[in-house]
Amino acid sequence: MSHPTPDVYEQGKGMDAHNQVMREIRSRKEASYDPHEPTRVWLDEDNTPNGVKRSLTIILNTGGCRWARAGGCTMCGYVAESVDGGSVSHEALMDQIDVCLAHEAENGDEPAELIKIYTSGSFLDEREVGAESRRAIADTFADRERMVVESLPDFVDREKIADFTRHGVDTDVAIGLETATDRVRHDCVNKYFDFADFEAACAEAAAADEEAAGDADAGIKAYLLMKPPFLTESEAVADMISSVERCAAVEGCHTVSMNPCNVQRYTMVDDLYFEDGYRPPWLWSVAHVLRETVDVDAIVVSDPVGHGSDRGPHNCQECDDLVQKAIKDFDLRQDPSVFEQVSCDCELTWEAVMERERSFNQPLTR
Ligand code: SF4
Ligand SMILES: [Zn+2]
């Protein structure tokens, strides 16, 4: 792949030290990918403000996130999947969409009601997906009920959202906020923007929603990261509870997807993991946060990736599948009683970790 380098946009955000480390780590990856194939595509079902819908999830290969090229987030290995040269043509992007439609036709009984497009970056960044491609993709899915597109908050504006809502398609922008705490986002995740930028993006979505009148809804789905590096289990849990509450209180944000960190290759988290400096969160922590935030005014879901493995969120191996299943049940029903039906001896270990784990402090003096 092309070597990550900062350009004007990415410099001067006060984060050059983490970025320098992340650029070195990412440059160890040597691989390139076909710009005519999506990174991944699959069928599933999802909880939306209008109930549970059949979904088609697409990870478009767009050349990758510009922040990742500068160095980027400490847990994110996605840029490792992007293409050589850093940009993908309109024709190639549309070829990727055709591959996804063929996958849907082959594997689904009917067209999915919900289309989710992730890009390992920002769908609304015109350097990744130009206006022509954005509008053509909006036209392709004009007959669906709902779209979700992923973007950093800087690129969210009401006109871009209107490309979708003008077809009468409810539209959500998924924003990788990671946490509502600026200090944790900057210093643990190495993500440059502030909570205020997220609030501004929510305001753009609310304005798009108003402009679409009754024809379509527009809103924000916030993605949170449970347990970035450098936090203890209990700090991570406290950070998630307050983050879910703060996101749910912002107008325009109707869904919070709180996802436990997993150890991806070619990331700082991966380096820490090999030095015994990182453990992914317990699934008990995920269940605890979901239970504690059940009264907020938003849908709160979690989709633990790689559950039960050392590099993913896990408990003791015995109970991982059961707790994961309870979390998935909660996602669809929002009913905290699903967690009453699971228990395991390792809950006691988790409680001890929550109580006793302390951050690592290198003493300055003897
Ligand atoms: S998490 Fe998002 S913003 Fe951060 S490097 Fe990855 S794709 Fe870019
Ligand atoms: Zn257990």
Image: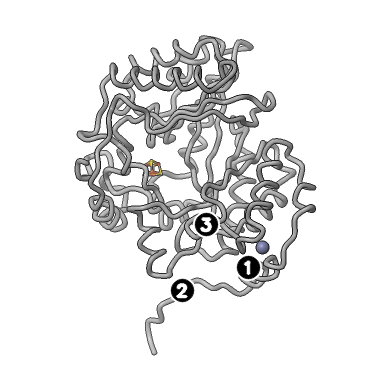
Q: CA distance from mark 1 to mark 2?
A: 15 Å
Q: Quadrant of residue 236?
A: bottom right
In terms of sequence position, does the residue under pointer 1 or pointer 2 come before the other? 1
First in sequence, mark 3 or 2: give its number.
Answer: 3
| Amino acid type shown at disc 3 | Ser
Which disc, if any, is residue 354?
A: 1
Which residue carries the number 3 mark?
Answer: 309
Residue under the point 43% across and 57% down: 188
Residue 114 horizontal/vertical position (percent): 57, 22
Q: Residue at x 54, y 38 (%)?
A: 222
Q: Is residue 31 left or right of residue 271?
A: left
**Residue at x 39% of width, y 12% of height:** 136
- Of the pair 315 and 250, the residue shown nearer to us: 315
Q: Nearer the viewer, residue 233 or 307?
A: 307
Q: Is residue 290 above or below residue 197?
A: below
The numbered mark, 1 or 3, whose residue comes first in the sequence reads 3
Q: Residues within 10 Å of mark 1 (few under 14, many from 20)?
A: some
Mark 3 or 2: the one toward you: 3
Question: Do labels 1 and 2 touch, CB within 8 Å?
Answer: no
Residue 343, placed above or below residue 206: below
